[in-house]
Image: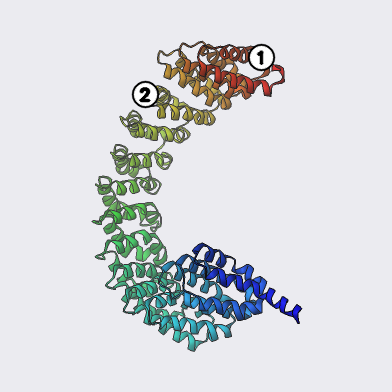
């Protein structure tokens, strides 16, 4: 008897610990306890988890939000711990309670877990347990439960009987017409999802009126969600039905009094365009898009501008050029001079995409002047967005034409008074190089790249050396030894010690891509010469450079030139020079046995 009592006590221990921790004043302890629920459930076994743990959790749902959030998340993974799908319904009561709490993130997590559990119910259990749960939430006194119900109707609709389906549609209708805006908002957010699982006849009879009412709601937060739902629903109709059923409401949304609603239309316009097809696009959406490009609110114009390339690409091929030239391009020309930098930046990131669509002649006549204006814009981001997309226009008009029109503007930017603008141009130079090729690059931009090595701002000089490495990797070693390295070595004789240091920084970067032969023949002698520089900063950078480039050099160069140079620098009068020289020397001696 005593033995049985001991075993009983041991089996009760996990639940006792859990209860103690859940009632502890320390929130962290309660949170840790919730996170260990699966371990406790395993210890209890499926039967006691169903009969003791779940009821206990259902009765004690009053706590800090972070504890409730963890509980809502845990319960969504509990199916096997309560005995599998046959018993999944026992998890509904605690989640139903959590779906009614005041904190939104807890409710949302509870709904997410309920949505995960819905497919795990059998058809019978779905109607016996899950649907009544949804009904209770949908008819709850507090708006919190009704908002949660909106997200649960669609996940059980497809598998229930026709009679229950009718009840669920009626429930959803009541949620769409609820007095509380938060409930209507939640219903509007799920309207598109529910529409995808509803039978076609009810889609036209019941859901179109719901969409129309929500799209004309007094609250803009409801209307903008209804617009998103309408775009999702548009793909479910045949085109002739779509024109009759929904287009009038969607057209009205492009002129809504709230800029937030117009913003959603602009942001989702390409999705709507794909759903409605070319004919409705031509008749309705082109005009709507033009008005959005001219919208009084900058956020709407920026959203519309960012869709320019995709919208134009999706136009019917036989009317595309005519529509762009007559209706869209005039709006684009106005936007180039927009007062808002975000609008201009959004436009600059996509406007180049019009070149392949409109062809060479239209690009030269109509688009090039716009690109030139954008390259001279006051905002760096606008200029850089144009430069980063030059490849689109290069494919259409060719590199010669590009050089005559756009490169002078790029050269002008490269010497801009603002160093961040110059930095931006440097970062795009390898991209330009790849588009122009080595010969053309040498002719037009090579001297520019070298001039950055003597810029008065260190960040520019540093970026310029990294830029040289990328160019060498792109154009090859022969190009490097003929074009770049002679000019780098020339810096070693400059009167300004900062530029002599830049020479060393460049050698650090170039040694690896140039390889052993070029490094030893052309660059190493310059480094050794600078070891005798009058400025200590230059001398200790020589030590750092030798340490950096030694893996590229062969053993004879190390023994004949590097080792003697470092030995001399370890005896330097400057302590910093001694330190860096000793560090480099020790590293070389450790790695190369010939120094021992």
The image shows residue 272 at horizontal and vertical percentages of: 38, 64
Compared with 24, 510 (above or below) is: above
Please name the residue shown 42% across and 19% down the image: 498
Compared with 15, 531 (above or below) is: above
Q: How many marks overall?
A: 2
The image shows residue 344 at horizontal and vertical percentages of: 30, 46
The image shows residue 484 at horizontal and vertical percentages of: 49, 21
The residue identified by callout 2 is 456
Q: Dot 2 lies on which element?
A: loop
Please name the residue shown 46% across and 15% down the image: 490
Farthest-out residue, bottom:
163
Q: Is residue 445 visible?
A: no
The image shows residue 99 at horizontal and vertical percentages of: 46, 74
The disc, 2 or 1, on the residue closer to the chain's N-terminal end is 2
Q: Residue 139 lies in what quarter of the image?
A: bottom left
The residue identified by callout 1 is 559
Q: Check the picture and name the quadrant holding the C terminus.
A: top right
């Amino acid at each position: 008897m005593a033995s049985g009592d001991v075993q009983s006590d041991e089996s009760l221990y996990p639940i006792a610990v859990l209860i103690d921790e859940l009632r502890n004043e320390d929130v962290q302890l309660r949170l840790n306890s919730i996170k260990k629920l699966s371990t406790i459930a395993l210890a209890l076994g499926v039967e006691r988890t169903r009969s003791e743990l779940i009821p206990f959790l259902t009765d004690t749902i009053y706590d800090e939000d972070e504890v409730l959030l963890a509980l809502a998340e845990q319960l969504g993974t509990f199916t096997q711990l309560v005995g599998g799908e046959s018993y999944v319904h026992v998890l509904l009561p605690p989640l139903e309670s959590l779906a009614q709490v005041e904190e939104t993130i807890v409710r949302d997590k509870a709904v997410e877990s309920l949505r995960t559990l819905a497919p795990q119910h059998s058809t019978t259990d779905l109607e016996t347990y899950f649907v009544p749960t949804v009904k209770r939430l949908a008819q709850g006194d507090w708006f919190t439960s009704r908002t949660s119900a909106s997200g649960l109707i669609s996940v059980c609709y497809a598998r229930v009987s026709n009679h229950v389906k009718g009840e669920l549609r009626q429930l959803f209708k009541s949620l769409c017409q609820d007095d509380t805006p938060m409930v209507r908002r939640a219903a509007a957010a799920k309207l598109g999802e529910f529409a995808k699982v509803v039978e076609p006849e009810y889609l036209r009879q019941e859901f179109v009126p719901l969409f129309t009412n929500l799209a004309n709601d007094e609250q803009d937060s409801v209307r903008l969600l209804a617009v998103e739902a309408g775009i999702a629903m548009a793909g479910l109709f045949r085109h002739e039905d779509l024109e009759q059923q929904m287009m009038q409401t969607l057209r009205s949304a492009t002129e809504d009094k709230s800029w937030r609603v117009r913003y959603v239309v602009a942001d989702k316009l390409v999705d709507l365009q794909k759903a409605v097809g070319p004919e409705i696009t031509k008749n309705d959406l082109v005009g709507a898009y033009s008005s959005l490009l001219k919208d009084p609110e900058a956020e709407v114009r920026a959203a519309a501008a960012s869709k320019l390339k995709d919208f134009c690409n999706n136009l019917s091929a036989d009317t595309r050029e005519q529509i762009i030239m007559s209706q869209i391009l005039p709006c684009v020309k106005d936007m180039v001079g927009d007062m808002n930098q975000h609008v201009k930046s959004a436009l600059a990131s996509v406007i180049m995409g019009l070149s392949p669509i409109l062809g060479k002649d239209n690009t030269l006549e109509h688009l090039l002047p716009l690109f030139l204006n954008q390259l001279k814009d006051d905002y760096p981001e606008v200029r850089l967005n144009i430069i980063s997309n030059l490849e689109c226009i290069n494919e259409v008009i060719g590199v010669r034409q590009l050089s005559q029109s756009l490169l002078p503007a790029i050269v002008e930017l490269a010497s801009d008074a603002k160093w961040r603008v110059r930095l931006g141009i440097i970062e795009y130079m390898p991209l330009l190089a790849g588009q122009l090729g080595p010969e053309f690059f040498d002719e037009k931009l090579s001297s520019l790249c070298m001039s950055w090595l003597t810029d008065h701002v260190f960040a520019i000089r540093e970026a310029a050396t990294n830029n040289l490495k990328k160019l060498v990797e792109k154009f090859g070693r022969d190009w490097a030894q003929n074009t770049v390295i002679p000019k780098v070595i020339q810096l070693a004789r400059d009167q300004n010690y900062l530029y002599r240091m830049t020479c060393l920084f460049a050698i650090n970067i170039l040694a690896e891509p140039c390889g052993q032969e070029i490094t030893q023949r052309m660059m190493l002698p310059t480094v050794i010469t600078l070891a005798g520089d009058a400025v200590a900063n230059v001398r200790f950078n020589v030590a750092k450079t030798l340490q950096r480039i030694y893996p590229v050099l062969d053993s004879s160069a190390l023994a004949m030139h590097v080792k003697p140079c470092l030995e001399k620098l370890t005896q330097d009068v400057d302590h910093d020079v001694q330190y860096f020289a000793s560090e480099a020397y020790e590293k070389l001696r450790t790695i190369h046995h010939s120094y021992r």
